[in-house]
Amino acid sequence: MFDIILYICKRLRAFGIISFSFFLVACGLETNRLTDGQGEYMADPVQVALLIPSSAEATAPIAASLENAARLAVADLGKVKIDLRVYDTAGNTDIAALQAQRAVKEGAKIIIGPLYGGAANAAGLAVANKNVNILSFSNNSAIAGGNVFVLGKTFDNTAKRIVEFAASQGKMRAVIVHPNNVEGSFGRLAIERAAMDTPLEIVATQSFEFSQDGVVNAVPLIRAAVEIEEADLIFLTSTTAGALGLLMQMLPEAGVQPDKVQFAGLARWDVPAQNLALPGVQGGWFALPDYRKSERFYARYKEAYGAQPHQLAGLAYDGIAAIGALLMAGQSDKFDRSVLTQTAGFEGVDGIFRLNGEGTNERGLAVAKVFNKRVVILDPAPSTFDLPSF
């Protein structure tokens, strides 16, 4: 709770707009009223709908973790009262749309979820004429816009952080390596977009079939691209659950040495920890959230529920934290686009984040490298947003 409060206090003082009621208690000023933004007492809790696939066998554990995290966030808000109501989408887009309509009919002022992009898009369309916004757990930027926001960690946000850092370190010529699938294409496009605003030039891209043979066949082509184009940076979009491990083993074996050309990635290279021993990972750059804050959330969750949360659970906490912070700041229960996209942003599980006018999000990320099989922070995650998003 205090992370949320102190962050908003600091930002509001910076902008000179501390003039609301209850939330001033947290900022060291005295009051005992929660207002609707216009001085009227809000006697009733604000109704928030949580759409999750509780009855879908494959996603039931994720849904349970999301619900637990959301309830933990509600409890952490203290005197700000949120009436959290859970609606089961069963992992089905049609049901998600129906449940969104039901939630709004029953009084929901804003919807958190659903989990997947297709369901979030359907839910958004279903309630678009009701002026109710959706904070989905998806990271698919293609569904963002209108009344749908994505809370998930996006390729664009990570690519922007890594590309700008690489450019600041004097890197000028990059090769992108990506699997020939949807995820790989999204990653490539995100890097290309990010590079457009920097001196860094994308000199080649090399895709590969998402298979062991595909990686094996691509390695000599990657080496050739690096040598011919005199690249000083290789971007890999693959995850540790995908082709990253094989690439990091085979590229150095083929003569593409990380001490000669910088490796960088869009995925977390430190999860699982055994990846830190891979030859190609040594010296590599990747982005990660403020791990100190993440660890606090994980500890709180385990204390409350006796188990570790799913890696997506923090998104539910973030959604409630944002809503609660706005209410604490005296905002009414009308969560329109201008309110949700405030420049100062919010404090979440992994650090600061904010929503932008395109429906996507920006998160404060650190840049790290692997050194002697350990993670070393090169550039810490920011603690505030000082400039408007995008």
Image (tube, rainbow, N blue to C red):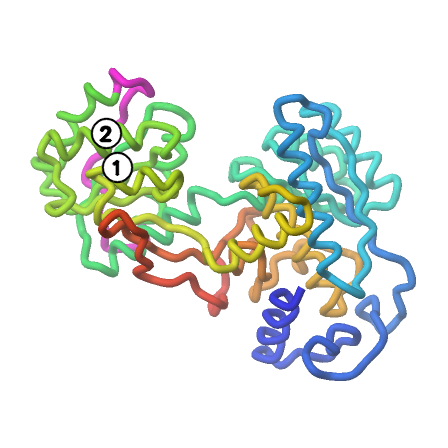
Residue visible at 69% across and 44% down in the picture: 68
Q: Amino acid at mark 1?
A: Ile
On the image, which quarter does residue 51 sit in?
top right
Residue type, label 2 = Gln
**Residue 7 in the image: above or below residue 67:** below
- Magenta stretch bounds: 196-214
The quarter of the picture where the N terminus appears is: bottom right
Which badge, 1 or 2, is on the more N-terminal residue? 1
- Image point (30%, 32%), residue name: 244
Disc 1 + disc 2, Cβ < 8 Å: yes
Which residue shows up at 62% across the image and 72% down it? 6
Above or below 25: residue 165? above
Between 321 and 335, the residue placed more toward the observer is 321
- Left or right, 286 with respect to 18, comes to left
Q: Nearer the viewer, residue 17 or 3?
A: 3
Examine the rendering and report whether any part of residue 224 can be seen: no
Task: Please say if 372 is above or below 168.
Answer: above
The percent position of residue 198, horizontal first and vertical second, equals: 28, 55
Percent position (x, y) of residue 262?
19, 47
Q: Quadrant of residue 65?
A: top right
Residue closest to the eye, 42 or 342: 42
Residues packed near mark 2 inside 10 Å, few (<14), some (14 to 19) or many (20 plus) = some
Residue beneath disc 1: 176
The question of residue 231 being in magenta is answered with no
Check the image and report above or below for 386 versus 197. below
Which mark identifies residue 206?
Answer: 2
Q: Is residue 212 magenta?
A: yes
Give SS at disc 2: strand
* Spatial CA span between label 1 and label 2: 6 Å
Give how far across and how far down residue 319 sits, in percent.
65, 50
